Amino acid sequence: MKKIGVFTDTHGNLPALKLMLDYFNSEGCEEILHLGDIVDIGPRSKECFDLITSTPNLTCVMGNHDRDFVLNNPFVRPYSHVPTEHKMQVFATLTEQDRQIAKKFPLYVTRNIGGQRILFCHYPFEWDTINNYLEAFPFKLIENVQTPQNFDKLMADCTNFDAIFFGHKHEYADVVGRRTYVNVGSLGCHPNPWAQGVVIEYDDNSWTYRRVRIPYNPEVVRQDMVQNVPCGEQLYNFYFLRIKP
């Protein structure tokens, strides 16, 4: 069986990232896909960006925070809780060369796996933005209730695909409607003490996937955030602990 490692929404969490990449390597994954949002929120965006973009056989797709970095747009978006001052500091740690690398991230990738066509993206998007997703914001509004009916409606224009893997909403989901929907869930930007991702296993005729959860201590990330990034405790409470302001 061949293997593909999939993870998403790293958001500057370097300890979780190292664990997941080591795991994918130990599993012999021939390819790794990161489904967007390397930067912001966590304390180590630059280190995560460098590690992800230098890892062999790893493909990144564009996330909304990656897009903001490319456009040098630090302003708070609707429904976001990442302050401008935080994004400004994060973007300042990255280089123009990093921006040019991120600018080339595709909006999505597809793979023919086990006889089926699978879409990998940060989140469902408007198909008429695929050629100008740096000019027009491409992503649809997040569906908070992750049910077959809601996903079928949200992704009704994805008729050419048998399965869709995505992130953006940090809570994972495994849903089967008209097709298989897999919200991989944020690597480490969630309340649980583990790094999470997915391994797809396949041959010429079939495929399956399994969830990966690797224990680690998020307190290390919290301390780094509080000490080293603007609004670090506020961001940790909201995105890691789900404490609303």
Image (cartoon, helix red, strand yellow):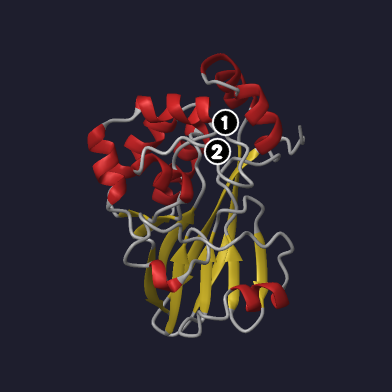
Label 1 SS: loop
Say whether residue 189 is visible: yes
Vertical order, 83 against 37 (above or below) = above
Q: In the depicted view, which residue is nearer to us: 135 or 201?
A: 135
Mark 1 lies on residue = 83
Q: Residue at x 64, y 77 (%)?
A: 153
- Mark 1 vs 2: CB contact within 8 A: yes
Relative to 100, 44 lies left or right:
right
- Callout 2: helix, strand or loop? loop
Along the line of sight, the residue nearer the viewer: 51 or 156: 156
Q: Earlier in the sequence, mark 1 or mark 2?
A: 2
Circle 2 packing at 10 Å, graded few (<14), some (14-19), many (20+), is: some
Would you say 55 lies left or right of 157 here?
left
Q: Return the x and y of residue 141 as percentages of the image width and height.
A: 60, 60
- Please say whether residue 55 is visible from this viewpoint: no
Disc 2 marks which residue?
76
Residue 20 coordinates in the image, percent (x, y): 48, 44
Q: Identity of the amino acid at label 1?
A: Pro
